[in-house]
Every structure is written in C-alpha cells, then in structure tokens.
Image: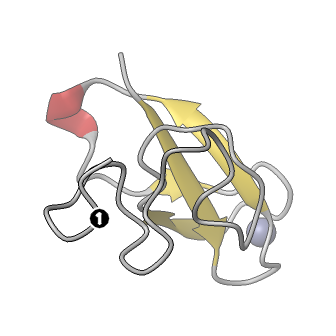
Amino acid sequence: MPIYEYVCSNCKLKFELLKAMSQSDEGATCPSCGRSAKRVLSLFSKSSDGSPSSSGGNSCSTCASDSCSSCSL
Ligand SMILES: [Zn+2]
C-alpha cells in the first residue's frame, strides 16, 4: 500500500498513513487534535520539507526533473 501524507488543517501536524488506493481520496483524522486532515502530495518519498531534489545527483538544475531533454544526462 502506498503511503499518503496528510497535514492537519487545525494544528498543522504532518503525518503519514498507509492507505489502500481505493481509500486515498478519503480524509484522515489528525492523531493529535482529532480534526480532519488534508492529503498532500509527497511522491511517496521520505524527503524532508522544502527540498524537492534531496536525493540523487542527476537531477537537472533547471527543471528539477530526473531526466529531461534539455539537459539529457
Ligand atoms: Zn491536528
């Protein structure tokens, strides 16, 4: 099952949940305050906040993609 990341709209807590694909559109409940949390897209990676290219040294510096036609690594 994929891991989905959620952010609580109330206390801003960020947490991850294992969910089946069929349940991915459903909301989650914040484990801290019990309010509903919204799903955020995280590409299922374990990177920390704010750094889109945290892994690998092959990313294109201009497009932040692993492989693009302009840099063609
Ligand atoms: Zn919360």
Residue at image point 58% right, 65% down = 52
Residue at image point 72% right, 60% down = 34
The relative height of residue 40 versus residue 17 in the rendered view (above or below) is below
Apparent side of residue 26 relative to residue 56 in the rendered image (left or right): left
Residue at image point 36% right, 76% down = 63
Residue at image point 60% right, 38% down = 56
Quarter of the N terminus within the rendering: top left
Apparent side of residue 64 relative to residue 10 in the rendered image (left or right): left
Q: How far from the left and from the top, in percent, is residue 64? A: 43, 68
- Which amino acid, by three-letter code, is at mark 1? Cys
Q: Name the quarter showing ligand 1.
A: bottom right
**Is residue 48 or residue 12 the one in the foreground?**
48
Q: Answer few, some or many: residues within 10 Å of disc 1's Cα (few below 14, many 20 plus, some between 14 and 19).
A: few
User: Mark 1 = which residue?
Assistant: 71
The relative height of residue 22 versus residue 5 in the rendered view (above or below) is above
Q: How far from the left and from the top, in percent, is residue 46? A: 66, 38
The residue at label 1 has a CB less than 8 Å from ligand 1: no
Classify mark 1: helix, strand or loop.
loop
Apparent side of residue 23 relative to residue 35 in the rendered image (left or right): left
Q: How far from the left and from the top, in percent, is residue 47? A: 69, 47
Apparent side of residue 73 relative to residue 21 in the rendered image (left or right): right
The relative height of residue 69 versus residue 18 in the rendered view (above or below) is below
